[in-house]
Image (spheres, grey):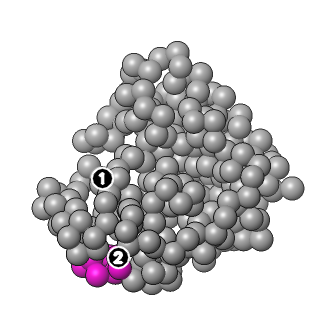
């Protein structure tokens, strides 16, 4: 069964990642760009995930943040971020995850997020009710204006003015408090668990959000990403949450709106 296989892969990957995390938090990290890092742990985790997925689903495609690629013969593609939140990982924060999402050519259909430093394993997708450590996750709740909150995401390429515009929009126009974890998949998990009402990011990649979007999609969530126009290797702005949240978020000019 797909769920059992991918859950086992995510757990195995988590064991490798957490060993690095505990043994060498000051691990040497190479720079892919300003505040964009890659470690040996990223590479080891991605290699294990890819090897296991290829063995279990040989006809499926693969896209990995650290360069792994395989063309799909089934129409399905596994989209992997071996350690989303590498800067957090390197700095000793627990705000990072192993993200494995499945794309059917039209939309995210299944995802697993393993947060080994927080002892959280989450999975869900089409016809797969989302669960946290085996417990069903309730549907997303309506926004309560008295305590509305949003997670924000900023990338190294985002200008100061764009960041300031987003913060101003959220705090003044939307009337929400904001949080920033420094990790897209962790932010989407916060949406799924009801810790925030939604997520807005100025720039994410498919491997940052594929698993998380599959999970919140089964909880009544939506996103602004139109996968007909977005390639799996592209950067794109995103808002995700309930429909009511997206109505509010759509007033921010940097976001497009398409189911």
Tell which residue pokes out farthest to the top in this image.
23
Q: Quadrant of the N terminus?
A: bottom right
Residue ranking furthest to the front: 146
Whole-percent x and y of residue 195?
A: 49, 56
Task: Using the rendered image of the protein, determine whether residue 109 is visible from the camera's viewpoint.
Answer: no
Q: Quadrant of residue 170?
A: bottom left
Q: In the shown orientation, is residue 43 left or right of residue 163?
A: right
Tell me the tag on residue 249: 2
- The one nearer the camera, 50 or 243, is 243
Residue 82 position in % (x across, y down): 55, 42
Nearer the observer: mark 1 or 2; the answer is 2
Q: Which residues are magenta?
A: 248-255
Callout 1 crowding tier (Cα within 10 Å): few <14, some 14–19, many ≥20: some
Q: Quadrant of residue 247?
A: bottom left
Disc number at residue 155?
A: 1
Is 254 one of the magenta-colored residues? yes
Residue 212 picture location, percent across and down: 56, 59
The residue carrying pointer 2 sits among few (fewer than 14), some (14 to 19) or many (20 or more) residues within 10 Å by Cα, namely many
Residue under the point 67% across and 45% down: 121
């Amino acid at each position: 069964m797909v769920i059992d296989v991918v859950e086992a892969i995510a757990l195995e990957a988590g064991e490798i990642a957490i060993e690095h995390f505990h043994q060498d938090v000051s691990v040497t990290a190479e720079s892919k760009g300003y505040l964009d890092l890659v470690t040996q742990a990223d590479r080891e985790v991605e290699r294990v995930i890819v090897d296991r997925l290829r063995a279990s689903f040989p006809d499926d495609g693969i896209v990995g943040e650290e360069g792994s690629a395989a063309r799909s013969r089934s129409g399905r593609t596994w989209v992997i971020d071996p350690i989303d939140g590498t800067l957090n990982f390197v700095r000793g924060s627990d705000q990072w995850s192993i993200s494995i999402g499945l794309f059917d050519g039209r939309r995210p259909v299944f995802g697993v997020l393993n947060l080994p430093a927080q002892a959280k394993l989450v999975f869900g997708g089409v016809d797969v009710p989302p669960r946290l450590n085996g417990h069903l996750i309730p549907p997303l709740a309506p926004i309560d204006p008295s305590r509305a909150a949003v997670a924000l995401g900023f990338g190294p390429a985002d200008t100061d003015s764009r960041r300031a515009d987003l913060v101003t929009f959220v705090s003044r126009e939307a009337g929400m408090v904001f949080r920033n974890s420094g990790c897209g998949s962790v932010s989407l998990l916060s949406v799924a668990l009801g810790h925030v009402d939604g997520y807005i990011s100025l720039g994410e990649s498919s491997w940052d959000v594929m698993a998380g979007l599959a999970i919140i999609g089964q909880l009544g969530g939506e996103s602004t990403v139109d996968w007909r126009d977005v390639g799996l290797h592209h950067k794109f702005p995103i808002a995700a949450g309930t429909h009511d949240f997206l109505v509010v978020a759509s007033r921010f000019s940097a976001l497009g709106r398409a189911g």
